[in-house]
Each structure stands twice: as structure tokens, then as C-alpha cells.
Amino acid sequence: MKQTGDKKMSLLRRPAVLVGAGVAMVALVLGLWAFQPWRLWTSNTIDEALPTIEPTSVSSFAESGPAAEPEAESDSDAASASETTEEPAPAPETPAEPIVLAGGEFVSQEHATSGTAEIIELADGSRIVRLTDLASSDGPDLRVAITDQEAGGDWFKYRDNRYHELGVLKGTHGNQNYEVPAELDLDGLSSVVIWCHRFSVAFGSAPVSL
């Protein structure tokens, strides 16, 4: 009788064990998807040059079709021509140098992060955020954003008020450019942050108050 009872208990426990194993497997898969722990050992480097605005070429003379055959000059035309001096063609315009509006060094937060972030105005009036000598950790769903929160301190505060994403982080290391929308008012914005969108936490941030 005892062996029969033990056998029944074993059969009853088997489905519970299988269900438990299935739940554990699902939890493991979800954990790996969310945390992606292998990214602690991965990195990639991007090296973008500072954008340049090419000068607009200025033509010396307007194109007016095929040249006409010269006509014989009268004495009065020759005298008038001798008094006329030809103006030199204007020199090509030299593009204005980029202007650094604000910038500062990264402060480490959840992960060690170094380098600088600058807001730069280009010659045509467009603006970019440039990350120089960036070195940070890889992670799931990393973004570059500009916010009204002070750099450093609380890891989670950056989405509390004004938060504007500029794009997905291009690389964990190197030099990178991120376009600032023309309509974005930078007044009051004070930090550039490497933001983990999945877990709402800052890897690092840099002060860029105007």
C-alpha cells in the first residue's frame, strides 16, 4: 500500500515540476531579453567628423547662351569702352566657423561614462549635439537626450519634465553627432544624457547649460 501511495504522489508531483520548469524557462528568457547581460562585454566605436557647410560658389558672369560675333566698333564706342573698367569677380564666401554654444564633461551614473558633450551651431544656423571621446558601457535600448535636469545625481530623474530624445546612441565609444530639431527651444535645457530607455536610468550625463 505504501509503494502505491508513493507512486501516486510521484505522478501528482510530476506536472507541478514540469509547470515550474516551464515558468522558470520563460522567466529566464524574459530576463535575458530585458537585461541583455552580454552587453557588459560588448562595445562599438563611431568616429564622425564635425559637419562642415560648403561655401556657395559665386559665378563671375551670368550664362547668356552662345557668344555673339563681335561687331565693328565705332570711334565713339571705342572711347566709351576705354573709360569703362571691368569690376573683378567677387571672391567665394568663406563659411563661418562652428560656434560652441555650451558644453561639459560627462559624469558617470549607473555605468562609468567619460568624454564631453557640446551643443554646436553650424554656419547655416543648424545645431547639433556632439559627443567627443565618449567612453561608456553598452546596454539595451540606449538613447541620447537633452533635458532640463542638472547633470549627475539621481539616475532616474531625467524624464521628470522636459526631455527630448535626439536619437539612438550610435556607439559606446568615439565621436558622434546628433541633430537638434530646428524648432527645439534650448533655453532652460541643461544636460545631455545617455539614457537607457528600457529601464529609465541614466548611464551618464554632461552639463550643457546655455
Image (cartoon, helix red, strand yellow):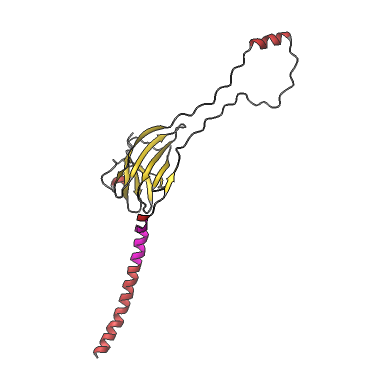
Region of the chain picked out in magenta, as a range: 26-39
- Choose between 103 and 160: the one closer to the eye: 103
Q: Residue at x 33, y 73 (%)?
A: 19
- Choose between 164 and 196: the one closer to the eye: 196
Find the residue positioned furthest to the bottom: 1
- Taking the image as shown, residue 80 lies to the left or right of residue 190, namely right
Q: Position of residue 83 (x, y in %)?
A: 64, 10
Location of the C terminus by quadrant is top left
* Residue 74 included in the magenta stretch of the image: no
Q: Quadrant of residue 86?
A: top right
- Choose between 27 and 96: the one closer to the eye: 96
Q: How many callouts does the rendering have? A: 0
Q: Is residue 13 above or below residue 1?
A: above
Q: Residue at x 37, y 37 (%)?
A: 118
Res. 95 in view: yes
Q: Quadrant of residue 2?
A: bottom left
Q: Position of residue 164 (x, y in %)?
A: 37, 43
Q: Position of residue 157 (x, y in %)?
A: 28, 46
